[in-house]
Amino acid sequence: MKKFCYHIPGMDCPSEEQIIRMKLEGIKGLEELAFDLEGRKLHVYYHGDVAEITPLIESLKMGGRLMTEEEVEGAESSGRDLRLERKMLWAVLIINAVFFVGEMVAGWLSGSMGLVADSLDMLADALVYGLSLWAVGAMIRRKKRVAAVSGYLQLILAILGLSEVIRRFTGVEIFPDFRAMIIVSIFALIANAVSLYLLQKSKSKGEHVKASMICTSNDVIINAGIILSGALVYWFGSPLPDLIIGSFVFVLIVWGAVRIIKLSQ
């Protein structure tokens, strides 16, 4: 058996881990995938040639490159408690789903595109975790079909959001409630922190604090950005900060959706 070590700069949270698992699991001869989110490394234990694995890693467009290759007697035990991991994934899924609904409602009632965009980011995370739960034991073809549906759903919602942003930029001025933006985003920040804690517990060996911060850096930045934009809306008396942060998040969602759609092909 061979052990291939890949450095993957774009792998910085559990959602990327699930995407990579979907891409590689089911390959004949694959023994185990061992992830190091802190080091952004992936160890592949495989009965085959590196030329069969590397193109799949590169196709994900996460900057993955082969670092080392060695012969090993067997895969290292990951020590994962699958029952605990499923429970934690369910908890994180529920948190993200609840905040998707809450932020979507709050976003439309307050007129904040930033909150609407962040709600779709929560939906994207919920879909990834839900897919990872559902896909256990499912056929690869079925996994990819469901991934494609979730990707297209995210893409459609994000494009609709961007269309609304453009509509507001071109003359339909809706002044968002900066108080709702700040308060709801603070709660979303807390939800991300709870999700992070649960994801840490799902690994029997644990994750380092540094790795955890890397995993949630994007969500934290988005939440902080909406809080800041809410303050700027109040300070300048203009809806532009909300539209700018909303556009930024919608573009991130489009990029993630396109990546999932490509994965499903």
Image: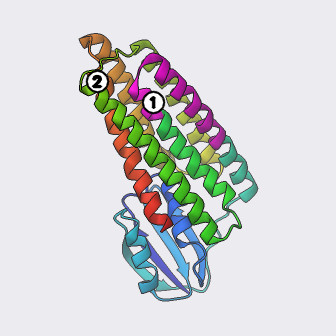
Whole-number angstrom distance, CA of label 2 to CA of label 1: 14 Å
Which label's residue is closer to the chain start, 2 or 1?
1
Which quadrant would residue 65 be assigned to in this image?
bottom left
Residue corresponding to mark 1: 116
Position of the N terminus by quadrant: bottom right
Residue 249 sits in quarter: top left
Q: Which residue is the site of mark 2?
A: 241
Residue 165 placement, left or right of 127: left
* Number of other residues with Cα within 10 Å of mark 1, as a class: few under 14, some 14 to 19, many 20 or more: many
Is residue 93 something one can see in this rendering?
Answer: yes
Crowdedness near tag 2: few (<14), some (14–19) or many (≥20) residues, C-alpha within 10 Å: many
Q: At numbered mark 2, what does the secondary structure look like: helix, strand or loop?
A: helix
Going by the numbered disc 1, the residue's amino acid type is Val
**90 relative to 31, above or below:** above
- Measured as percent of width and height from the top left, residue 132 is found at 62, 57
Residue 96 part of the magenta-drawn span = yes
| Frontmost residue, 63 versus 131 | 131
In this figure, what is the number of numbered marks?
Answer: 2
The region drawn magenta spans: 92-118
Q: Residue 157: where, in percent of width, then height?
A: 46, 41
Vertical placement of residue 15 versus 184, above or below: below
What's the magenta bit mostly, secondary-structure-wise? helix
Residue 189: % across, % down? 49, 30
